[in-house]
Image (cartoon, rainbow, N blue to C red):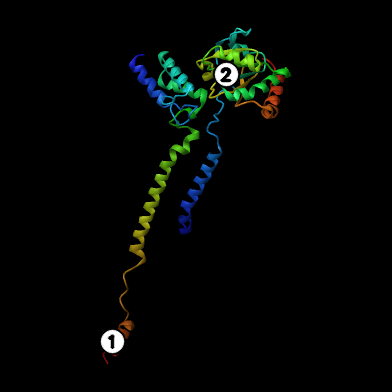
Amino acid sequence: MNKHLAFLTPLLVFSILVGYFAIGLTKDPSKLPNMLAGQPVPEFTLAGLQGRDDEGFKNTDLLGDVTLVNVFGSWCEACRVEHPFLMEIKQKNLIPIHAIDWREVDSKAGPLWLKKNGDPYTLVGDDPKSKAAISFGVTGAPETFLVDKKGIIRFKHVGPINKQVWQSTLEPLIVRLNKESRS
Amino acid sequence: MDPALEARARHISKGLRCLVCQNQSIDDSDASLAKDLRVLVRERITAGDSNDQVEAYVVSRYGDFVLLKPPFNMTTLVLWLSPLLLFICGTIAIIVFFRRKKKATTTSTPAPLPLTDAEKKRVTELLMEGDQ
């Protein structure tokens, strides 16, 4: 082996490691992969919220239409930021928004919060013990799942939905999924 | 809960990452999601799941990242094999280094050749000059 090359080897290995770690640093460890992408929504049956018309929310409700499933909680600050935009989406009548009311300490807190901030949801399930949330792989609120007509999870958005996310990602995807057949 | 099952639950919980405070296990964490995950682990154990089945379920929801000890698979191949690889490279480097050194001492400095007749004569001349 060339003597110069032998001296350069440690430098080369070091450079490779630096490159490797530099790429690693740009990644956000709190962003987990969506393990459920392309899979049917997990089975769940949740009771409804007090004062709402629906009887609750279960996985079979998600068959037939392209839907959004929003995970929120009255304790969640980012949800308060997101909420007005969900109200706007409801106005567009493009897609039904269902919700999982996650980890309410008091079962009255969710309904009260919706009364105050507006209620954009079609069906809402109460999930105080994270039963549904864990099966969806939820790590924090808000998280929103886009479900196709066959009940398959196609996309997950972590964090509040805003105009930018809606226009660049969600709306085009919804329009495309709406064109797919039901069977 | 049966102490044996509880011990298993604790063991599994220590290996699962809390998704809220990511460098704690769910066994250590006070986060509410960690609490619900601990409950889930116990429920599944009570329902008859093996330790691996419980872990596989949580991984199916949250991905490999949830395991505090990374599993051995295609994406972690470099991670697990690099120490072994570096060890082998180091060993080879040391062997090569010492072999060369040995070779250098035995071959590159051969024993001095005996003086030729002409040289012997010259030496004698020089010595004689010194005497005078």
User: Circle 1 sits on which residue?
Assistant: B127
| Residue occupying the point 36% across, 62% down | B104
**A138 vs A19: above or below:** above
- Image location (x, y in percent) of residue A89: 70, 20
Parent chain of label 2: A
Q: Which amino acid type corresponds to the residue marked 2 in the rendered image?
A: Ser
Q: Of circles 1 and 2, which is in front? A: 2
Q: Nearer the viewer, residue A125 or B101?
A: A125
**Where, by quadrant of the figure, is residue A155 drawn?**
top right
Q: Nearer the viewer, residue B52 or B69?
A: B69
Parent chain of label 1: B
**B117 vs B108: above or below:** below
Q: Which amino acid type corresponds to the residue marked 1 in the rendered image?
A: Leu
Q: Nearer the viewer, residue A172 or B49?
A: A172
Outermost residue to the front:
A116
**Label 1 SS:** helix
- Tell me the distance, in whole angstroms, between the alpha carbons under discs 1 and 2: 109 Å
